Image (cartoon, rainbow, N blue to C red):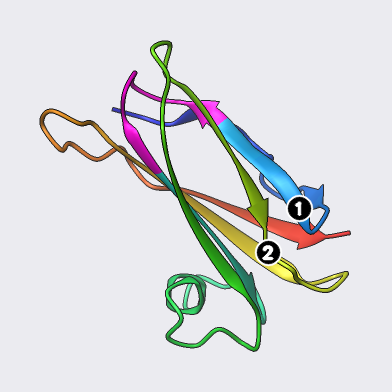
């Protein structure tokens, strides 16, 4: 199980509302989390997304299921201000064995 062809790309500038898309195993449960962070560092990213210390930002958690070809997409509306740093985290869980793909993380900036 893996996540590939993930969009938006690392370092991308995105609007407040954007689409997260990619490819994984057919039928996999995909969890997409986006959080506004004070500064995108390894120490604060996950805690901010999970709401432990969100730096005054917003966070969104969406779940979707990959189609029969393994493609997925979901709309995200994070409501962050222009110039705000975002962290995108994508997890994919295979439905039968519950095997998780390696977590994919991207750092983004709001337009």
**Viewer-proximal residue among 45 and 61:** 61
Label 1, label 2: how far apart the Cα atoms are:
7 Å
Q: Is residue 5 visible?
A: no
Image label count:
2
- Residue 21 is situated, as x and y percent measured from the top left of the image, at 59, 33
Tell me if residue 29 is in the magenta stretch: yes
Which corner quadrant of the image does residue 9 belong to?
Answer: top right
Residue lying at 55% horizontally and 83% vertically, measured from the top left:
54
Considering the image in quadrants, where does the C terminus appear?
Answer: bottom right
Secondary structure beneath label 1: strand
Q: How many C-alpha atoms fall within 10 Å of the one at disc 2: few (<14), some, or many (≥20)?
A: many
Residue 17's tag is 1
**Relative to 56, is 14 on the left or the right?**
right
Residue 67's tag is none
Secondary structure beneath label 2: loop
- Residue 49 is situated, as x and y percent measured from the top left of the image, at 49, 71
Magenta stretch? 22-30
Image height of 96 relative to 81, above or below: above
Residue lying at 13% horizontally and 28% vertically, measured from the top left:
96
Tell me if residue 55 is in the magenta stretch: no
Image height of 86 relative to 31, above or below: below
Residue 78's tag is 2
Disc 1 to disc 2: CB gap under 8 Å: yes
Which corner quadrant of the image does residue 79 belong to?
Answer: bottom right
Residue lying at 57% horizontally and 73% vertically, measured from the top left:
41
- Residue 26 is situated, as x and y percent measured from the top left of the image, at 34, 18
- Residue 92 is situated, as x and y percent measured from the top left of the image, at 34, 38
The first of marks 1 and 2 along the sequence is: 1
Please identify the residue farthest to the top as the structure is shown. Answer: 69
Residue lying at 31% horizontally and 29% vertically, measured from the top left:
28
């Amino acid at each position: 199980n893996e996540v590939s062809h993930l969009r938006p790309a690392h370092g991308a500038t995105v609007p407040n509302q954007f689409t997260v898309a990619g490819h994984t195993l057919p039928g996999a449960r995909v969890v997409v989390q986006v959080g506004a962070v004070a500064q995108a560092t390894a120490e604060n990213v996950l805690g901010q997304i999970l709401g432990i210390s969100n730096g005054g930002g917003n966070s969104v958690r969406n779940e979707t299921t990959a189609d029969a070809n393994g493609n997925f997409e979901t709309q995200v509306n994070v409501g962050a201000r222009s110039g705000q740093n975002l962290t995108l985290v994508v997890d994919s869980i295979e439905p039968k064995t519950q095997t998780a793909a390696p977590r994919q993380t991207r750092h983004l900036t709001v337009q």
